[in-house]
Image (tube, grey):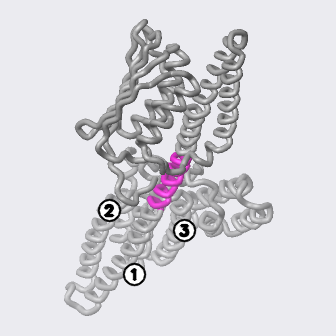
């Protein structure tokens, strides 16, 4: 056989090897994950050993990112991201090496075969299709994604039919392994089982042509050996593909879980900052508002009743000191549970509001259940915010507070005799109050009219604290 007769397989094989060699040398040079020493080692190895060294590089070089695109070989897109790109590329390159070796072995052992030229052409065409499918066709929606593997199998089975010696099952298995590696699991399984059926039919036909029957020991043993080898190789590659697929899915799941964890952490941090801001607004804001009111009252009384003016200024000074204290301690106490019962704490708050601001609040409390600490905190903060708004915006002097339990709900209504308004604007205080109430599954409604003050209505589901519970 002359060299020109082998060109159909030697030319595409040589071109492909040079392309892969040049590509991976460039890829090593641009890979920022490798040190200069590692780059030099991989580049020299690829330059000398070509495809095997490129496969080693794919399997061992540090992976930069899961979604890295290689542009030339094995770009993972769409549904085919189930296996990390470098792993599939490495397997693909090794299968190319194995195909070339077995193809040359078949050609060398078939010099007397009258169909040798056709076999060389078929082997070369199968190799080209294998390369095209492995490099360029990666999307399942592409029709060639399914056609090209079928052509590979058809061509190699024709070679199997024309081949007159033994050992061709190895290159058939290489093609099957390439199909399993290159397409999704289910189509790969269908192609592999179909190949097995056609392959065994061809083996039976060849056994009949050689032995005249398949009942001879040699024919039966040959068929069993071929069947066993095919099944073992198929099972190995198919199981490996499933394992790689499972690992890839786990990797994607872990990555998504990490991203969600970071998002939840960020959201928790924002929520905590908002909660702290709300606590400071509800406590320090009310305290400083009371101090401003006391200072303004003292300014008005300083020329009329000096003693009363000094008393108001003393109250203002106490409120400012209390505000500074609350600023220092609010972060420490923000998560602490409330140990004082709700009604005594409410009475103390109302007395403090009246003493420091002069706003007189008439309260009616009718509760049958013990409120949870978080519910107590929300209602007490709501009373503080309502009183602050009544003084600051409505200039109220009196207010009515009703807290009662009805149909598994705690209902709170706060009404004042302030100036009222045509439109209710939700500032930071009301917005924060509404968020707190809604976080408990409740609702908040504000109503007002000019000259009629304003009314805040809150409803939250009843929660009963069990013995020993602490928040």
Q: Is disc 2 placed on a helix, strand or loop?
A: helix
Which residue does the numbered mark 2 point to in the structure image?
Answer: 191
Where is mark 3, residue-wise?
94
Q: What's the magenta region?
A: 248-265
Residue 184's x, y, as percent?
Answer: 38, 57
Residue 21 % position (x, y): 66, 59
Residue nearer the viewer, 431 or 137: 431
Instruction: Identify the residue shown where x is 33% and y is 58%.
Output: 187
Q: Upstream in the sequence, badge 3 or badge 2?
A: 3
Residue 307: x, y in percent? 70, 20
Q: Residue at x 73, y 62 (%)?
A: 43
Comparing 244 with 30, the one in front is 244
Give x and y (percent) for residue 256: 49, 52
Q: Residue at horizontal 47%, vertical 23%?
A: 360
Residue designated by label 1:
166
Kind of element beneath mark 3: helix
Tell me if 288 is positioned left or right of 118 in this view.
right
Viewer-nearest residue: 445 or 9: 445
């Amino acid at each position: 056989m002359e060299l020109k007769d082998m060109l159909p397989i030697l030319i595409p094989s040589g071109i492909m090897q040079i392309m892969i060699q040049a590509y991976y040398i460039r890829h090593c040079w641009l890979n920022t994950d490798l040190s200069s020493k590692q780059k030099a080692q991989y580049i020299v190895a690829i330059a000398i050993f070509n495809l095997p060294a490129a496969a080693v590089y794919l399997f061992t070089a540090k992976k930069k990112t899961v979604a890295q695109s290689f542009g030339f070989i094995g770009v993972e897109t769409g549904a085919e991201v189930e296996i990390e790109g470098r792993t599939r590329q490495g397997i693909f390159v090794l299968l190319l090496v194995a195909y070339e070796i077995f193809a040359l072995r078949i050609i060398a052992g078939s010099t007397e075969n009258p169909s040798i030229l056709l076999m060389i052409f078929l082997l070369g065409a199968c190799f080209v299709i294998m390369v095209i499918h492995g490099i360029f066709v990666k999307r399942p929606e592409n029709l060639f994604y399914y056609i090209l593997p079928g052509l590979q199998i058809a061509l190699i089975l024709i070679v199997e039919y024309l081949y007159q010696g033994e050992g061709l099952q190895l290159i058939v298995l290489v093609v099957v392994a390439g199909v399993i590696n290159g397409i999704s699991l289910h189509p790969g399984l269908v192609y592999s089982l179909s190949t097995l059926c056609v392959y065994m039919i061809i083996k039976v036909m060849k056994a009949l042509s050689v032995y005249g029957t398949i009942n001879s020991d040699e024919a039966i043993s040959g068929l069993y050996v071929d069947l066993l080898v095919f099944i073992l190789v198929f099972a190995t590659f198919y199981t490996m593909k499933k394992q790689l697929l499972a690992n890839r899915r786990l990797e994607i799941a872990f990555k998504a879980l990490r991203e969600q964890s970071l998002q939840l952490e960020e959201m928790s941090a924002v929520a905590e900052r908002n909660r702290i801001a709300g606590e400071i607004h509800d406590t320090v804001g009310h305290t400083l508002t009371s101090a401003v009111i006391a200072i303004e009252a003292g300014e008005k009384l300083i020329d009329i009743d000096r003693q009363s003016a000094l008393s108001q200024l003393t109250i203002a000074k106490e409120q400012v000191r209390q505000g500074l204290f609350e600023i220092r301690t609010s972060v420490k106490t923000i998560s602490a549970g409330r140990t004082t019962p709700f009604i005594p704490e409410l009475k103390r708050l109302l007395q403090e509001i009246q003493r420091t601001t002069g706003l007189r609040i008439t309260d009616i409390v009718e509760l049958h259940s013990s409120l949870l600490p978080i519910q107590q905190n929300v209602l007490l903060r709501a009373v503080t915010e309502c009183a602050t708004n009544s003084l600051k915006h409505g200039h109220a002097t009196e207010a009515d507070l009703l807290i009662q339990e009805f149909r598994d709900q705690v209902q709170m209504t706060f009404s004042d005799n302030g100036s009222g308004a045509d439109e209710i604007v939700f500032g930071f205080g009301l917005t924060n109050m509404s968020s707190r109430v809604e976080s408990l599954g409740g609702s908040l409604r504000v109503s007002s009219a000019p000259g009629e003050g304003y009314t805040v209505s809150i409803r939250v589901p009843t929660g009963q604290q069990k013995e020993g519970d602490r928040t």
